[in-house]
Image (spheres, rainbow, N blue to C red):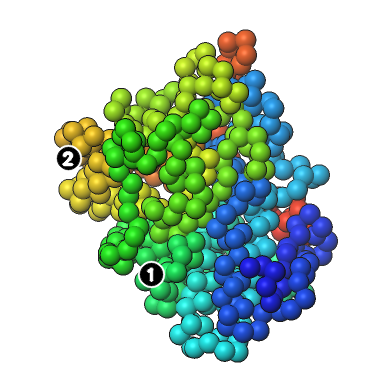
Amino acid sequence: MRKLLYIIIMVSLVACKDSFLEVVPLGSQTAVTTDDYDKLMNDPAYYFQSFAGGWQEQTLMEDDVAAEEVYLIQGSQQMLRLFQWQDVIYQQQDQAPWAVSLWLEQLYSLNKIINEVMVASGGTNDQKRSIRAEALATRAWTYFQFINFYGKPYVQGTAGSDPGFPIIEQADVSMTNFTRASVQAVYDFIIKDLNAAIADLPVRPLVRTRMSKSAAEGLLGKVYLYMGKNNDALAMFNAAFTDLTGSDTRLYDYNQTLAPGGAFLPLDMMIGPSQGPGNNQNDLTEALVSKVFYNGSYSGNQLGNNGIVLAPWAAALYGASDLRLQLYTNTNPDLSPNTGGRLRKYGVQYSRMGLQLPDLYLLSAECKARLNDLQGAVGDVETLRKNRMPAADAAVPAAIAGNQTALIRFIFDERIREFAAEGHRWFDMRRQSVDPIFAGQVFTHTLYKADGTIATYTLQQPKRLVLQLPPTLVNANPGMSNNP
C-alpha cells in the first residue's frame, strides 16, 4: 500500500541535525483523494513491527522475567543494559529505539491525515470523518506509548509539572526546537483525540488492524484507569463491551484449542502451539485492534529475548491445570534442557500490544474492584479464567473474592499469568509504584550464571521507571531536558 499513489514520509532519527522531523520521500505523488488517505491508514507499519521490536524494551525490563547468562550475553549490549536497569541504555553512538523511530515516522503521516483528509477530493463526508477518526485514535495510541516510555507514572498532584513528551500536531518539517509537554498535558491530549474520534469510528471495522469504536473506547478506559478516574474508565469499558456485541471478537477457549485434536495442536518443539495468536501474526480472533511485534529470539527484532525465562516467583502463580503453561518450555533456545527447570515462553513469537479482549476483561475487573463492585470484578476475571483452564479450577478463591485489596492483587497476578514476558507487565510495574496497595514493592531481576551462581539486580525507584530520551532526540533539540 505504501507504494500506491502517495508519499510515505520517513523520519530519520539517525540522521537528525536541526530537527527529528527530517523527511525522506519514498514515492513521487502525494495523497490527494480520500482513497489515498484511506490507503495511508493501511500501512502495515501501523500494525506489525518485526525489526522494530515494539515493546521489546518493556519485555526485558519487566520483573516477571529472569535470564540465563550464557544466552543473554549473545545479545546486544543494549539488551544487557535494559535487563540490568542501567541508567543509560542508549549511548551517543546508538540509534534510537526502532519502535520509537517508527512511531515518530507514523506521527507525521497521522498528522497529515488528520489535517488534510477533510479537504481531499472524492469520497463522502462520512468517509472522510471516519478516516480522520482512525488517525486521531491511532495518534492517541501512539502518544500513550510515548508517555509510558518517557514520562513518570501518572500522579494527579505532580502530573502538571512532570516532564512528558513533545506534543506535535502539525505535519510540518520546518518545525524545530520541540519542548517536552507535561505528563498531564500529554494525557489531556490523548483524551481529546479519543473523544474526538469515537463518534465517527466504525462499530465494525473492515479489518481489526484499524481502529474501531470499541477499540477507542477500551483505550480511553485504559487511559482513565491509569489516571485513577475509575468511574470514567468503567463507563468506557462498558461501552466497549456493548459495541463488541455481535462481533467476531471472542476469547479462545484453551480447553478446546489445546485438547486432543484442538486447533492449536500439535505442539511444535520450536514454537509450541502450532496455531493461535501467539504464533500467527494474522490471527485477530481476540483483538479489538491488532498491533503486533515479533518477540522471538535471535532474529527479526532489535534486541531479541535470548536467554529470557520466566522468573520462578511468576511461574509459581500458575496452577497445575492452567493451560497457559503450554505456552512455555523447559528447554533453552538451542533446545537443550534447562538444568534449573526454568520456563521459557516459546508459544508467543508475536506479542500483542494493541488492545486484546483478555486485557479488556482484566482492566474492567480491576476498575470494578477499585469501585468496590467485587462481584462484577470476579465475574470478569472468571470469564477469562474459564477459557484458560478447566471450569472447576477457574473460580477466584472465596477469601480473595470478598476482599477488595486481595482481589486487586489477584487481578494483577492474573495479568502476569496472561501476559508474562510480553511487555505488558512493565506498564503495570509503573502503576504499582504509585499505588498505595503496592507500597514498598521492590522489583528485582535474577541472572543465572553458567557456573551455578546468580546475580541479582534491583530497579532504582522512581528513577528507572522511565527511560532516558534517546540521544538522537536530545541532540536534535538543544535545551530539551532529559530524564535523569
Instruction: State the residue in front, 276 or 351.
Output: 276
Residue 35, horizontal then vertical, whole percent: 58, 80
Q: Residue at x 64, y 76 (%)?
A: 112
Residue 128, horizontal then vertical, whole percent: 51, 83
Q: Secondary structure at mark 2?
A: loop
- The disc labelled 2 sits on which kind of residue? Gly
Horizontal relation, residue 128 to residue 227: left or right: right
Residue 204: which numbered mark, if any?
1
Residue furthest out toward the front = 261
Please tell me whether residue 46 is drawn above or below residue 126 in the rendered image: above
Q: Is residue 156 visible?
A: no
Please tell me whether residue 115 is drawn above or below residue 393 in the rendered image: below
- The disc labelled 1 sits on which kind of residue? Arg
Q: Residue at x 66, y 84 (%)?
A: 32
Residue 402: which numbered mark, if any?
2
Residue 368, horizontal then vertical, whole percent: 26, 52
Please tell me whether residue 132 is drawn above or below residue 10 in the rendered image: below
